Amino acid sequence: MTTDTPATTHAVEWLTAEQQVHWRAFRGGSARLFAALEHELERDTGLSTHEYEVLVRLSETPDRTLRMAQLADNLAHSRSRLTHTIRRMEEQGLVERLPCIEDARGVNCTMTEKGWQVLVAAAPSHVQSVRDHLVDILTPEQFAALGDAMETVRLHLTGGACHVE
Amino acid sequence: MTTDTPATTHAVEWLTAEQQVHWRAFRGGSARLFAALEHELERDTGLSTHEYEVLVRLSETPDRTLRMAQLADNLAHSRSRLTHTIRRMEEQGLVERLPCIEDARGVNCTMTEKGWQVLVAAAPSHVQSVRDHLVDILTPEQFAALGDAMETVRLHLTGGACHVE
DNA sequence: CGAGTGTAGTACAACTTTGAACTAACAGTT
DNA sequence: AACTGTTAGTTCAAAGTTGTACTACACTCG
């Protein structure tokens, strides 16, 4: 729908033609980028980007362990979705679930040694993909601007909380 | 996995700490933004963003019609996925599928009057969401830079083809 | 304490997406 | 015309995702 010639008269500020071009570039570029990264990671390592991200988050904690809820918040995934992902990863031997001592409701998700090995093996390929399709095709200034803009978006959406991601 | 202290020695250029921050902001911000837009559109109009985008593309052609393949390319969706989406939309009476005269293999997907009405009714809310969570929280320069960067990404991934999106 | 409220995680069923296999039709070649 | 390769679109089964409902535990305040 063309935004500069709205079909009806509403109390809505439409996007200007220029804004629309940028918005579409963002949406289309992001969709294609994430799809490409997903496919290359899957092809090269058998991991989905979600699984990869789970391993990354766990690898960054001192004991390679996170509570399910923290993991879900970090990844911006629903609880339900994370439960499924972690169950599948547990079946593959990449992670383990252990009861949480401090809070009997909780579940600690820990990376196994195999999980660590899989991550180490997968990382170079994935980093290269991110470089190939994003980092290296932009100027450093462009990439930094992209990051800064999206950090603003992220902070806005999380209400300034969730500094982890 | 921290990129400035790789666990193994590879012939890989790792991301610098700064690049990693930008990359994560982009990934996290995008994921949350698209999720928020999806939820608000669904809540306010009952449409998914995919369905909305289908209607938008169709609305922009002179006869409100596109071939399945064009639609799939525009949206960067798989053929299979588009078939399912269009079947569901056809059941809701938003679009219609008609055989293509020029190419007997093809299928023309046309927006119905109801589809047009649904789009007109949905657009203001969606535009407002995009403004609220993206356009209006960035400076015009930031938003333009974002669009330009992602256009570069998109062109790189589509090999310069597919100027439509 | 114990009643009420909130949080952590899982289970279930419905829905969506995926990739491969398939049918049909076009296009070029000999 | 027959052969080959390519493109358009759908179908199928497997896998992933969603939202709700549910159980168990924790926290707070009378």
Image (tube, coloured by chain):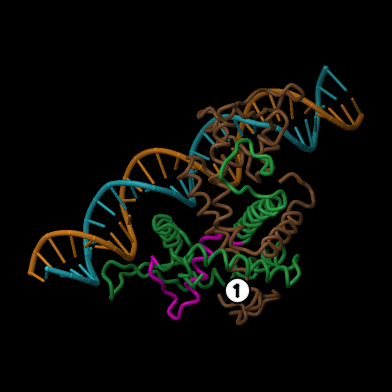
Chain colours: A green, B brown, C orange, D cyan
Q: Is residue B103 above or below residue A42?
A: above
SS of the residue under disc 1: helix
Q: Nearer the viewer, residue A131 or D30?
A: D30
Query: Which amino acid, mark 1?
Result: Val
Count of labels shown? 1
The residue lying at 60 percent from left, 73 percent from top is B21
Q: Is A61 one of the magenta-colored residues?
A: yes
Instruction: Look at the picture and state if A17 lies above or below B27.
Output: above
State the residue in front, B15 or A162: A162
With A111 as the anchor, is A52 left or right in this view?
A: right
**Place of residue B137 in the rendered image (x, y in percent of width and height, measured from the top left):** 58, 62
| Chain letter for the residue marked with disc 1 in the picture | B
Q: Quadrant of residue A128?
A: bottom right
Residue name at image x 47 percent, y 43 percent: B44
Frontmost residue, D3 versus A161:
A161
Inspect the magenta stretch and tell me whether residue A49 lies in it: yes
Q: Quadrant of the N terminus of chain A?
A: top right
When asked about the image quadrant of residue A43, the answer is bottom right
Residue at image point 28% right, 76% down:
A102
Q: Position of residue A5 (x, y in %)?
A: 68, 40
Q: How far from the left and from the top, in percent, is residue A25?
A: 69, 53
Magenta segment range?
Answer: A45-69
Q: Position of residue B54 (x, y in %)?
A: 61, 38
Tell me the residue at 65%/69% (across/down).
A127
Q: Which residue is mark 1?
A: B21
Crowdedness near tag 1: few (<14), some (14–19) or many (≥20) residues, C-alpha within 10 Å: some
A135 left or right of C22? right
Q: Nearer the viewer, residue B44 or B38?
A: B44
